Image (spheres, coloured by chain):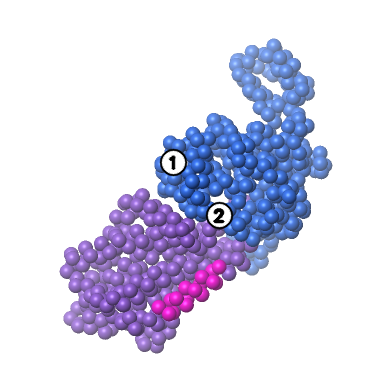
Chain colours: A purple, B blue
Amino acid sequence: MSKYIEVFRLSFKMQIVWRFDAAMTMLMTFGRIFAGWILWRTIFDGKALVGGFTFRAMLSYYIAGSILNAVNFSNQISGEVSGLIREGRFSGHMVTPMNPMGFFSAMAAGESAFHLGFSILAAVLCAAVFRVDVALTGSAPGLLLGAAMALLGLTFTSCFQYFIGILAFKFVDITFFLHVQWNIIAFATGAMVPLALLPKAALSVLQFVPFTHVVYTPAMLFTGQLTAREGLLGLGVITAWTLAVLVIAQYTYGRLRVKYEGVGI
Amino acid sequence: MALIEAKNLTKVYKRFEKEPGLWGSVKSLFHRRLVEKEAVSGFDLTVERGEFVGLIGPNGAGKTTLIKMLTGIIPPTSGALSVLGFTPNKLQNELKRQYAVVMGQKSQLMFDLTPADTFLLFKRMYEIPDDEYRHSLALLTDLFGAGAYLNMQVRTLSLGERMKMELVTALLHDPKVLFLDEPTIGLDAPAQRQIRAFLKEVNTRRGTTILLTSHYMEDVRSLCPRSVVVGGGRKVYDGGTEALFDAYQTHKKVTVQFEGETAFTAPDACALLEQSPHKAVFTIPKERSGAILEQIMREHSLSDISIEEEDIGVVVEKIYRQETGARL
């Protein structure tokens, strides 16, 4: 385990090197929240409720969701892994005594941890500037459950992204898979719109989809729009999916890596 | 028991062939022609503990494929292979903890951080105890005189400094076997010399078994008592390095620069490779080099002269032709 903690630390240290990049990420989070504020203010113009949300609840969800979405850096894993495989540089991860999936997940976690601080700071600033009264839950179980789900969500997306990345062992170019998963993730995480706005039937299906519990459920828990009891099903679903994708990714790696040739590189 | 044992090792790659042009690309959408290439063929190799073996061969000879199979990166198509008693392609951590790989063009260092940061990762990865780590790091950086840039960002290091750090990284856990693929590629002469001295010291002091591939004759000649020559995926020579060069490196390459315009005629037994009014490049038989050079210097006014060993590719070509009767 200590080697993965060292990778996490290494990744965290890497972020500190590039100060401009860190500052811009913070500015972007600020910009995203500002854009959300304008958008939802326009939509709510004269209305007390939209899809069962008040303006305050909607903006709070949007801020929490933006942070959770912005700090999840695991979406880079698939592109990075497939690039390394295509260029023949993945071999470096095959000859060292460390699980490549663990390595890439720990790298993503380190990056996420670094940006989490900046994102929260941007959100606090934004809330202060636009006088947004953020509705955070006062329930300790709700907060804990939300935090656990956010962590599991990061683990799940890391393993899932790694799985997509290693498909390059067989397909070499995985652009198609990347497009499909980007679209599914953007929609099903609730990063585009709160899933509560969708029809009930769609929602009942989505609650068994893992991506729903990466941003949507934890954000709803943090903002007190779901109780801890309601969140428990989500915790079960994301845990099951994380374990499943872990096993599938490991199995796929074992099967596909023998196809790796890296001829001419 | 030998550390590395390969028997009848073969690797066949399948490559996709496409006709040129747009129509060729459209056709390839529906029908793809796969072409097989035997990169390594019926290769036998035994390496004992503490040996320093040079793998020599021209580009595409199969050296890197062989290293990839020995380290488990790719599986052989057929044949038997054992490294330290393990089957490499199973990629067991027990084996990976006992070897190290340095590929000249692929870095293990974290470019945005310092070498010391990467060393810490490798310390954890190989579970090196604190005392051992400190001792190993001190020894290796001392051998290289590389203490000054341990805390510099990797991307700011020169190629030579970076390669030294790659080697320190690879050797921190004191591997039993070190695979080196072109470690001196692109380096200037002083850096090459330093790396050679370092590797010699590591092999002698720690007893590390080293398998080295290199295009530079000097690397193999000064480091490896034993050479294995690979040509067309086959082993064409396995034996003493000096004996190899004595037997096959029969000519030297000479470049002379004339002081004025000169109509130069190459002496008997020499082969002219390149000629201009001010310069001539030719090969001369090694055993007659002294006499012939003396004659040239007597007959012409020279402004410069350089003598090089015969190119490694030419030597391999000669061995290959002699062993198989074919050209590479």
Is A243 one of the magenta-colored residues? Answer: yes
Amino acid type of the residue tagged 2 in the rendering: Thr
Q: In the image shown, does B218 or A87 lie closer to the viewer?
A: B218
Q: In the image shown, does B177 or A237 lie closer to the viewer?
A: B177
Is A204 one of the magenta-colored residues? Answer: no
What whole-number distance in Å separates the C-alpha atoms at marks 1 and 2?
Answer: 22 Å
Quarter location, residue B288: top right
Can you give x and y, in whole percent of width and height, for residue A57 in the image?
A: 24, 77
Q: Give the residues drawn in magenta, as a range.
A: A235-250
Can you give x and y, in whole percent of width and height, for residue B98 in the image?
A: 60, 51
Q: Chain of mark 1?
A: B
Can you give x and y, in whole percent of width and height, for residue A229 in the image?
A: 34, 83
The residue under label 2 is A96
Point 41% across, 68% down: residue: A154
Whether residue B127 is visible to the viewer of this picture, yes or no, is: yes
Amino acid type of the residue tagged 1 in the rendering: Leu
In the displayed structure, A30 sits above or below B183; it is below
**Drawn side of residue B172 relative to residue A112, left or right:** right
Q: Which mark is residue B150?
A: 1
Count of labels shown?
Answer: 2
Would you say the magenta stretch is mainly helix, strand or loop?
Answer: helix
Can you give x and y, in whole percent of width and height, for residue A129 in the image?
A: 18, 64
